[in-house]
């Protein structure tokens, strides 16, 4: 099985590229969706957030007020690290189950779209690592336009992640999404050819090691969670 790691910076175009993978018939596991599911009302992630941030973090319907939580954690590095630490085991487990379900269905190539792929060291599980890169000015403009935030807020959010230029330097494949959508699609077509090629022996060993790591880390996570150690 080939696990493609798709990452980048906030609003660099990961969802845009993951949409292209889906259209090409390659299933995608989206860490942002998993991260939303693991904090739905009543889940373990939800309980941890309420315990840590208090009842004020809830909307009237009992769901987490994501906009408020975002405001809090993106303006306070310690709280952001705390939230990431609280949710990481739940998110890793969720990603693993999604991969497992697709694997059982017989999918041999799966893309995992994880914004914090390098930050959480999950890059070692995936091969190749694709970084969707964009020029900073364009990234800020698109983020402001999409989320209706100020330039300062956009810059703050960008600063909470590892530098996109550094991610680019660590990538196996870079997709430059600074231009038009058509330009990105053209690069994607080349990438698709590359990732559709059969795995070399070296790559097979790497991805098998990667998959075993996922199994072991998740099993450890589940055990620790059951013993309330997380
Ligand atoms: C803070 C929250 C509530 C804001 O929710 P909101 O719906 O506004 O944004 P959404 O979840 O769609 O995230 C948008 C983007 O923000 C960035 N982002 C999210 N969490 C983090 C984080 N902890 N650190 C840095 N960047 C982050 C990512 O690039 C992500 O794609 C939410 O992002 C969250 O729960 N984050 C913690 C979980 C996490 O680490 N998610 C990343 C998945 S690997
Ligand atoms: N090549 C492009 N040309 C113009 N707009 C684009 C292009 N690529 C992406 N966008 C727009 O930029 C915004 C950010 O793109 P997208 O949502 O794909 O980024 P992302 O990396 O998934 O973001 P996040 O980290 O917040 O999940 C979206 O509004 C999208 O429509």
Image (spheres, helix red, strand yellow):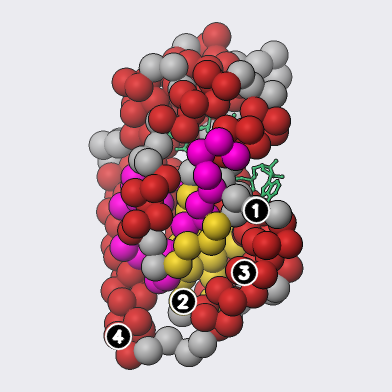
Q: Which residue is mark 1?
A: 179
- Mark 3 or mark 2: name the one nearer the start of the chain: 2
- Of badges 1 and 4, nearer the viewer stands 1
Confirm or reject: label 1 Cβ below 8 Å from ligand 2: yes
Q: Do the numbered discs 1 and 2 sit on residues whose CB atoms are within 8 Å?
A: no
On residue 188, which mark appears?
A: 3
Return the residue at label 2: 2
Of residues 13 and 88, the one nearer the viewer is 13
116 sits left or right of 32 in the view: left
Q: Which residues are magenta?
A: 114-138
> Which residue is depicted at the point 71% across and 56% down?
181
Q: Residue at x 33, y 69 (%)?
A: 210
Callout in the foreground (4, 2): 4
**In the depicted view, which residue is nearer to us: 17 or 43?**
17
In reply to whether residue 123 is colored magenta, the answer given is yes
Quick check: can you spot residue 76? yes
Q: Secondary structure at mark 4?
A: helix
- The numbered dot on residue 202 is 4
Query: Is label 1 in a helix, a strand or a loop?
Result: loop
């Amino acid at each position: 099985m080939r696990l493609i790691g798709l990452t980048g910076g906030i609003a660099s175009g990961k969802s845009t590229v993951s949409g292209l993978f889906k259209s090409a018939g390659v299933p995608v596991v989206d860490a942002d969706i998993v991260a939303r599911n693991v904090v739905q009302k009543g889940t373990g992630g939800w309980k941890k957030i309420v315990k840590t941030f208090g009842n004020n973090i809830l909307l009237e319907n009992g769901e987490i007020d994501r906009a408020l939580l975002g405001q809090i954690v993106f303006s306070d590095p310690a709280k952001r690290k705390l939230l990431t630490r609280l949710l990481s085991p739940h998110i890793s487990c969720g990603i693993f189950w999604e991969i497992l379900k697709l694997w059982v269905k017989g999918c041999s190539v799966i893309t995992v779209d994880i914004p914090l792929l390098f930050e959480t060291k999950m890059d070692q599980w995936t091969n190749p690592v694709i970084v969707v890169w964009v020029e900073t000015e364009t990234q800020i403009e698109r983020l402001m336009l999409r989320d209706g935030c100020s330039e300062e807020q956009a810059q703050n959010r960008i600063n909470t992640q590892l530098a996109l230029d550094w991610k680019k330097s660590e990538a196996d494949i870079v997709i430059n999404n600074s231009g038009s959508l058509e330009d990105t699609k053209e690069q994607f077509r080349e990438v698709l050819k590359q990732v559709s090629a059969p795995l070399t022996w070296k790559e097979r060993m790497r991805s098998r090691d990667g998959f075993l790591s996922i199994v072991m880390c998740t099993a450890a996570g589940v055990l620790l969670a059951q013993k309330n150690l997380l």
